[in-house]
Image (tube, rainbow, N blue to C red):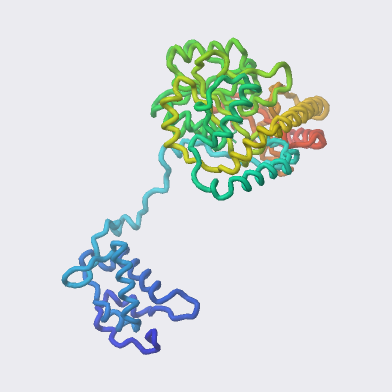
């Protein structure tokens, strides 16, 4: 039937290549796609799959309309769209199919292999994804303790004052108010020396790490990283096509060797000096100074990842490496993922003073200023004193939880083990004997709603003897420690 109810008049006028349209007529079902849309899709598909070779002529709109029993207007509009999209071209002899770069039939039968670039393939995939609400999940702060009402007030205030003005792009380096608030906080809390131009607000520490790689390395450069170490930094380096050199960690933090400096000098050294992740070691003052001095001599840059340095439980607060000596070649990376909450996705990068003039214009091109409401709310949250109050409360809470976890390990975990890393942060590292392999243990723990992270997942060199569990206590109440540890000990006994 025609659109107007009539039957197609002339089906022979089109030629056999149009049989597919005639043998399966356009659907006129109520609520279905319009005739125009159906015809467009069918003709486009026919051009793409080679049924109409390049240069072949399409029938005139009147002939096609009559053959299909649709109005001429429908065909004209479809031809117009196909012409705009470049599938057909009007010519003096009528409408012709355009020459397209189409895959040959045999190529279509063998599609391109579904592989990533070497860079993507090199990234280690997580075997056990994080389950933040499970007991002992590392890296998660005490979510239930977050002052949600105060945060909502800061957000409301910003929304009311800024309104739709804030919906446009913001400054790529971040909202000036937040950059100033971060700078003031770092100067007081971490001994930071820097100017406002050096502060870049990022999407968490991860973006800051990637920025460092993009700013100061070229493919093939050498980067040193801690082994065992944080997987996020491995990922950032893998994307830079760098030669990654694992450097061992001992009780005093990153242990570099004279032979590494001589044979494989770095362009970038990535470290977590305040609380090595995952072992918990604190990089000693003499190693810090030595590292700064040697990097200076070799033209290398340090990336100081201070992810949980705000939570220092023993001794004096440690000053950051960035502020240790004037002009230290240090990129300082910080995050609000631990001090506030991870889904905020706000962190910051402090550019080295001597690089800021060159790096800031590049950062301006690499980033887009977004999340303006959250950034301004955070600035208000910090300037109004809420942030320091929350930090002080969390420091007390985490210290209590750390003490309780240490006690619970001594009393309720009857498996030979060694504990490291309680001076800062929100996790303890429990080293286990080889007959308690950490990966099957962590898998078994998942079934009991526990998510300690296997230490071996943080090893870079396969076969290194890092075996144990990273036990997070940030988001785990003390009441869960003893039963959880009993259960883990039980699972270890069941492993063999
Ligand atoms: C060593 C280290 N750096 C940084 C981060 C935080 O990264 P982000 O700010 O991207 O959440 C983590 C989180 O677990 C970490 O363990």
* Residue under the image location 56 percent in, 43 percent down: 371
Residue 185: image x %, image y %?
Answer: 63, 26
Residue 372 in percent (x, y) is at 56, 42
Q: Relative to 294, say whether 392 is above or below.
A: below
Q: Is residue 432 visible in the rendered structure shown here?
A: no
Task: Please give the name of the residue rendered at 72% of the width and 43% of the height, measured from the top-left corner.
Answer: 148
Question: Residue pushed farthest front?
Answer: 161
Q: Residue furthest bottom?
A: 6
* Front position in the image: 98 or 416: 98
Position of 453 compared to 212: left or right? right
Residue ranking furthest to the left:
92
Q: Which part of the image, by quadrant, shows the C terminus?
A: top right
Which residue is more in the foreground, 70 or 167? Answer: 167
- Report whether residue 185 is seen: yes
On screen, residue 396 versus residue 72, left or right, reads right
- Residue 422's quadrant in the figure? top right
**In the depicted view, which residue is nearer to us: 15 or 195?**
195
Query: Image quadrant of ligand 1?
Result: top right
Vertical placement of residue 111 versus 36, above or below:
above
Residue lying at 39% horizontally and 27% vertically, measured from the top left: 218
Left or right side of 286 for 486: right
Left or right: residue 353 versus residue 452 is left
The image quarter containing residue 346 is top right
State the image coordinates of residue 362 (x, y, percent, origin top left): 42, 32
Q: Work out which quarter of the rendered image holds the N terminus and state it.
A: bottom left
Pinpoint residue 378: horizontal percent, then vertical percent.
63, 37
Label total for image:
0
């Amino acid at each position: 039937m025609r659109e107007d109810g009539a039957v197609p008049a002339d089906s022979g006028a089109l030629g056999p290549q149009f049989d597919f349209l005639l043998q399966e007529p356009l659907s006129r079902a109520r609520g279905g796609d319009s005739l125009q849309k159906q015809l467009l899709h069918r003709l486009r598909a026919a051009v793409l799959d080679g049924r109409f070779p390049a240069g072949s002529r399409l029938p005139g709109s009147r002939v096609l309309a009559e053959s299909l029993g649709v109005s001429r207007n429908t065909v004209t509009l479809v031809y117009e769209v196909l012409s705009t999209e470049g599938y057909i071209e009007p010519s003096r002899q009528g409408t012709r199919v355009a020459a397209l770069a189409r895959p040959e039939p045999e190529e279509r039968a063998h599609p391109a292999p579904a592989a990533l670039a070497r860079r993507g393939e090199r990234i280690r995939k997580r075997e056990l994804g994080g389950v933040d609400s499970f007991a002992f999940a590392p890296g998660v702060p005490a979510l239930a303790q977050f002052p949600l009402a105060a945060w909502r007030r800061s957000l409301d205030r910003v929304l009311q004052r800024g309104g739709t003005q804030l919906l446009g792009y913001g400054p790529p380096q971040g909202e000036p108010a937040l950059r100033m608030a971060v700078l003031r906080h770092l100067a007081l809390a971490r001994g930071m020396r820097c100017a406002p131009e050096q502060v870049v607000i990022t999407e968490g520490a991860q973006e800051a790490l990637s920025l460092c790689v993009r700013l100061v390395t070229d493919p093939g450069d050498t980067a040193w990283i801690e082994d065992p170490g944080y997987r996020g930094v491995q990922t950032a380096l893998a994307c830079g096509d760098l030669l990654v050199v694992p450097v061992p960690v001992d009780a005093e933090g990153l242990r570099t060797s004279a032979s590494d400096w001589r044979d494989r000098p770095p362009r970038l050294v990535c470290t977590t000096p305040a609380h090595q992740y995952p072992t918990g070691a604190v990089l000693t003052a003499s190693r810090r100074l030595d590292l700064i001095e040697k990097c200076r001599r070799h033209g290398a840059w340090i990336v100081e990842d201070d992810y949980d340095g705000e939570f220092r439980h023993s001794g004096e607060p440690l000053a950051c490496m960035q502020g240790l000596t004037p002009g230290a070649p240090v990129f300082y990376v910080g995050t609000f993922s631990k001090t506030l909450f991870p889904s905020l996705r706000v962190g910051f990068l402090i550019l080295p003073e001597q690089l800021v003039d060159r790096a800031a214009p590049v950062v301006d091109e690499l980033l887009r200023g977004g999340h303006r409401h959250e950034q301004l709310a955070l600035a208000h949250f910090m300037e109004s004193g809420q942030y320091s109050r929350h930090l002080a409360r969390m420091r007390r809470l985490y210290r209590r939880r750390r003490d309780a976890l240490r006690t619970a390990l001594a009393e309720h975990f009857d498996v030979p083990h060694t504990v490291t890393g309680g001076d800062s942060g929100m996790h303890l590292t429990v080293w286990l004997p080889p007959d308690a392999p950490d990966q099957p243990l962590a898998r078994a723990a998942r079934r009991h709603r526990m998510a300690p992270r296997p230490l071996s997942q943080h090893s870079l060199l396969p076969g290194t003897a890092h075996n144990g569990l990273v036990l997070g206590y940030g988001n785990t109440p003390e009441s869960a420690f003893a039963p959880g540890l009993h259960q883990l000990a039980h699972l270890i006994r069941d492993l063999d």
